[in-house]
Amino acid sequence: MTAVDVGPVGTPEFEPVAVRADYAPPTVGIDPDQTKGWMKRLLPLVRAHRRTLVIGVITGVFALATQVAVPAAGRSAVDAAITGDRRALWIVAVLIAVFGVGRLIFGGVYRFYLFKLGWNVETDLRAIMYEHLTRLSFSYYDRTQSGQVISRANSDIRSVQLLLAFGPLISMNLLMFVMALGFMVYIHPWLALVALAPLPGVYWFGLKFRNQVFPLSWVTQARMADLATIVDENVNGTRVVKSFAAEKRQIALLGRSAQRIQWTNVEIANSRSRWNPIIESLPRLGTAMVVLYGGWLAIEGVVSIGTLLAFSAYVIMLQVPFRMAGFVLMQGQRAGAAAQRIYEILDEVPEIIDSPTAVDIVEPRGQVDFEDVRFGYNPETPVLDGFSLHIEPGERVAIVGSTGSGKSTVARLLDRFYDVDGGSVSIDGTDVRDVTLRSLRHTVGLVLDEPFLFSASVHDNIAYARPTASRADVVAAATAAQAHGFICELADGYDSVVGERGYTLSGGQRQRIAIARTLLANPKVLVLDDATSAIDVTVEEAIHQALQGLMDNRTTIIIAHRLSTISLAERVVVLDQGRVANVGTHADLLATDPHYVEILARHSDDDSVDGSGGASGNGDGKVGQGLDSNLPGFPKSGDAPWTFGGGG
Ligand SMILES: Nc1ncnc2c1ncn2[C@@H]1O[C@H](COP(=O)(O)OP(=O)(O)OP(=O)(O)O)[C@@H](O)[C@H]1O
Ligand SMILES: [Mg+2]
C-alpha cells in the first residue's frame, strides 16, 4: 500500500512538499521475549535497517578517524617547525587539509544516515503500534484511557527515536575516546594513565545520576500521558464541561496535572545540574595533571613540545564523550522508560483473534443461535447466564429488557467483540469462534446506540462500510435510512464535512447516517441497538417501512425500548436476569406477561404508550397494526433500491 492510497478519504491532493510514498511497512516487530532488555527487544527493528546503520557507522568511524588524526599530525608539524624542516611542514599541512575534507564528507554522510535510521525506526514503531492497537480487543479499550494510548504513540515513540538517532552518534564518540586513548598510550603510557585518573570518578557520579533520573523520567512519561488524557477529555467533553459551567474546575485539573509534570522535570533538571557539572569537570582535573606532569617531562627533555601539545589536544578530545555522557544517560533513561511503556501496549495479547482453523462465512443464511451463553465483563458477575435463543434466517426479533439487562451485550457477543465464558454463539450453526473475524463482521452489521461519525464528508461516512461504493449506492442507502432529505439540505449536500464525531449534526441525524452506513454494507444479519432512539416517531416509522422492504431476506435483531420499534418484530424476546424470560409476539406478551408490560411502561414517557393496556390509538398503535408499505417514495418489500456487491 502506498501513502497516497488513503481509502475513502478521497483523492490525493496537492502537497506543498514532495511526499515520498515508497516507504515500505515494517516486516518485523519487536522481540516478543519480555525477559530481554528494552534495547535488545528493539534490535529486530534496527536490524531491518542495517544497511542504513552500517553506512552511518562506517562513515562515522572515518569521520572520527580524520578528527582524531589531526592532533597527531599537528604534533609532527610543531616538531618540524622547531627543527626547521620545511618539507615536513608542507606534507603535514597538506595532510591536515585532506583530513579536513574527509571530515567534511564523512561527517555529512554519517549524520544523514544515522538520523534517517532514527526516523525509520520511529515510523516502524508507529506502524507496528497502530497495527497492534487495531488488533486489540474491546476489553483492552474498556480499561484504557485514550490519552494514554495517544501519548505512547507520540511522545514515547519520539523519545525512543531521539535515542536511536543520537545513540550511534554517541557510541561513536566512545570510539573516538578509544582512538584518542590509543594515540595517547602510544605517545606516552604513563602520561596517558595520569590523564585517565579521574575516569572512575566520572563513572561513579554517572551511576548516581542515572539512579536518580531513571525513576523520574518514568514518572514524567506517565504524567505526560495523564495530561494527554485530561486534554483529550476536555476537548471531547467540552459540551458537558460548558453545560455545567465547570471550565474553572477543568482548568484547575489541567493546571495540577501540568504542575506535576513541571515538578518531575524540574527535579530532573535539579539532579542534572548537580551531577552533570561534576561529570564534565572531572576530566579538567586530568588536563591539569597532564600539564603538570607532561610539562615536567618536556622540561626534562623526555617528550617533545609537539607531543605535549598533541597530548593536551587528546585530553580535550576525551572530554567530548564525557560531556555527551550526561545527555546520553538522561536520554537513555527516558527512552528506556518510553520503550517499556510502548512495549506494555505491544505485549498486550489480543484476546479476540482468528483461530488457526478459522474459515470464512460463505453465503450466509442468517441463522443465529445462542446456546446456554454465560458471559460477564468481569467473569465473577455474569451479565448473561443461561441465555439461549434461536433465530431463524430472515426472522425479525426484538430483544426487550430493562436497562442494564444485557441487550447490547447480546449484540456484542454476536459480533464477537467479546468471547463467551460458557456456552456458544453461532451463525448458521458455526461457532463464531470458528469463523474469520473479517467475514463475521461483514455478515453481522451492528448499528450502535452511540453513532460515531468521522470528521469527513457525509458521503465518506456512509461509504465507510464500502469505500468503493458509488454515489448512487450511498444515496440509496441514505434514502432508506431517511437521511437523504436532510443531507440534501446541508450546505454541500453529501460532500458536507460533519465535524469531529459528527457534532454538527443532530443526534437523530447522526443515527440515520449510522443506519445508512450499515445498510450500505448489506449485512445478512442486521442488529439495531437502540439505533432509532433519537429519531422522532414519524421518521422512525418511515425508516422501518424502508427497512421492512430490506429486511425480507435478512435476519434482523432489534433492540429497542419504544413500542413502535418493537412492534416491527415478528417475535419479541424478553431478557431478564441474564436469560430469556419470555418469548412471543408483541400482542401475546402484552396480554400475558405483566413483566413485559412493566418494562414497556417504564419507557412510556418518551413513547406515550399506555403500558398497562397495550397500544393506545396514537402513532405507535398504528404501527402495531402493520405498516402501510405503499407510501410514495419508499421502496416496496423485496426490491432493494440499490445493488450490492457480493456478500461473503
Ligand atoms: N464494557 C463494559 N465493561 C464492563 N461492564 C459493562 C460494559 N458494558 C456493559 N457493562 C455492564 O453490563 C451490564 C449489561 O450492559 P448492556 O449494555 O448489555 O445493557 P443494556 O441492556 O444494553 O442496557 P441499555 O438498555 O441501557 O442499553 C450492565 O450492568 C453494564 O453495567
Ligand atoms: Mg444497550
Image (tube, helix red, strand yellow):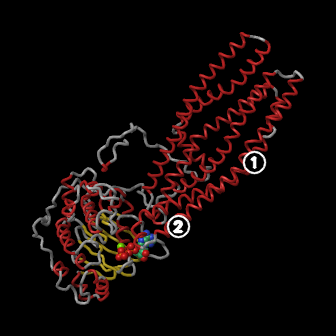
Say which element carries label 2.
helix
Residue indicated by mark 2: 253
The answer to whether residue 372 is visible is no
Say which element carries label 1.
helix
Q: Where in the figure is residue 357, as x and y percent of width and height?
A: 40, 55
Q: Which image quadrant for residue 590?
A: bottom left
- Residue displayed at 23% across by 59% down: 490
Distance of mark 2 from mark 1, alpha carbons?
38 Å
Residue indicated by mark 1: 205
Q: Which image quadrant for residue 62?
A: top right
Q: Does residue 473 lie above or below 109 as drawn? A: below
Mark 2 vs mark 1: give the one in front.
2
Q: Nearer the viewer, residue 612 or 424?
A: 612
Query: Horizontal placement of 530 versus 304: left or right?
Result: left
Q: Where in the figure is residue 368, as x and y percent of width and height?
A: 30, 68
Residue with the most extreme right position: 300
